[in-house]
Amino acid sequence: MIVSAPDHNQIEISVIGPGYGESILIHIGSGRWIVIDSCINSHDKSPAAPSYLTTLGLDPAECVHLIVTTHWHDDHIRGLSALVRACKSAKFCLAAALTTQEFLETLASYDEAHGLVSGSGASEIMSTLQIVRDEGRRAARVVADTRLYQCPGTDLAHGQSCEIWGLSPSAKQFDLSLRAIGNLMPQPTEAKRRAPEQGRNDLSIAAWISIGDLAILLGADLEERNDPELGWTAIISSSSRPPGKASFFKIPHHGSFNGHCGAVWDDLLVSRPTTVLTPWNRGRGLPLQSDIERIRSHSDAAFATTTFKANPVRRRVPAVEKQLREVGVKIKSDVLRTGHVRLRNGGTKNANTWCVEMLEGSCHLDTLIAA
Amino acid sequence: MAIALRHFYNLESFADNEVNQTYFPDAIKNKLELNRQAASAVIGQQQVDAPTAQRFDAKDLPGDVKPIWIGDPNAQAIRVSLQPLQEWEGYVVELAGDNFTAKLVDRTAGQSSEEEIAEFPIADLSENDRKLLRPGAVFRWVIGYQRSIGGQRRRVSQLVFRRMPSWSRRDLSRAKARAKDLIDNINWE
């Protein structure tokens, strides 16, 4: 593995995950990085993004300019507070619906459930916001077609300007989410419990990064709702989104059919883009074979950050193993081994030539299920 | 007198509400008192006092002093202990049909984050625990050896939902204030 940082005129896209979650780092040039989401590295239990930057000899406190938390599901925010704390120069971005009084009050209520070894389910994001508040960090509320960051070409070694946009969630999604949050709010005399995991990913921020003529589409976990004002269709329908077509696509929602929208491939992506996804091992696992076939019909250079080889389930003493068999409970590891797909272009002279490295157990999508 | 009699007849395993006036109608009280006096004479009129009572087995008593069991002697309070071999804290993530799915934190291994997941049949829960079953509910799951007072040992699996305190109005008020503080004091663009 190359452990040196990219050249100042190189673009790098690193997709790390899952382990527990996923995290994407993008070097936009001149030592400036952005980080999308946070995950814990299964190998050393450290937050993956700052750990990777440190490996490259970089200081997260200086080099990270933007952190985007695409949604508040557990698998996208593990280690977020440590990431934000380490990246002292970064602006922090979060979906606008997650910054309302109603949502934060709900989360803060769940954070009152103390004494749980696994935590309240709300502590990571509450701790993050507390750091942003206490340190006076810049923060942005994201709705559809929000520009989150811009940098002129004169500030970047490759001479290309850079813009980062949030493409979602839509205004209608904002309204729907406020109503849904009301159902989560604990009531007096209700027994405390951990914040329930949220089923849908409707508040997910899909991000668009343009660097000169190069465009990158990061799909987070955004799902398609077949509604012109929601999901991917709302993005495609928008007249305010940045123009162009992306040549790299982080496949949304672990490659699931729920995250698929045919119009994305036609309207937002070049023909045969490079694609990466992070697998998920709950239930039958994602992506399914049918998902792989669908993605492969659009993309030749298609990769997964890891295989389905989970961390081995811990073996217990024979009496415990016997009891587990007798009660019929099968324990699975919930944590896949963290992997890493990294792309670097050829810098100014070969901006459209990409070197793809499959690191730490990642694989081509064709070999994912067999691996 | 009830306390003295309880000690005398080795009835300490009974709770107070079991050794009460209901079990001591006057006729029985009188007979027991006569028996106690007789027993005292046999054993040298030792004081039968609650904190320092000696226990006397039935065989130490003269033949006409017969111990009266209050309640079913086989239903004495059974003291059991549980020797845990493995313990998890878990929380419910999903209810589906007859089962629920939960994430698990291995407490025996000293973990503080959930790395395992399992599915459990709802039918295995007690009636009381089923009332607590909902996403986010927290439980303790222990596999170990249960020992009864008689020394019998058997391997058990116990999953018990935690009876968490309720959200109080003060909790919710504090949460409201915390949320407002974040909104008002974060440097939003």
Image (cartoon, coloured by chain):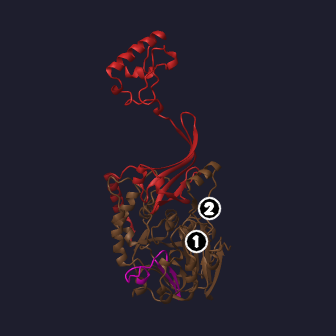
Percent position of residue A168, x then y: 42, 78
Pick whichever, A190 or A285, lies toward us: A285
**On screen, A164 above or below A59?**
below
Q: Is residue A158 left or right of residue A240?
A: right
**Marker disc for residue A44:** 2
Q: Which chain carries label 1?
A: A
> Judging from the image, what is the letter of the chain drawn in red?
B
> Judging from the image, what is the letter of the chain drawn in brown?
A
User: Do the residues marked 1 and 2 share a common chain?
Assistant: yes
**Residue B17 appears in which quarter of the rendering?**
top left
Q: Residue at x 32, y 20 (%)?
A: B26
Percent position of residue A83, x then y: 52, 65
Q: Does the magenta stretch include residue A226?
A: yes
Q: Which residue is drawn at 39% across and 77% down?
A: A143
Q: How far apart are marks 1 and 2 (CA)?
A: 14 Å
Quarter of the rendering occupied by the N terminus of chain A: bottom right
Q: For mark 1, what is the residue?
A: A16
Q: Which chain carries label 2?
A: A
Percent position of residue B160, x then y: 47, 49
Pick whichever, B140 or A108, lies toward us: B140
Q: Which residue is drawn at 38% across and 15% down?
A: B33
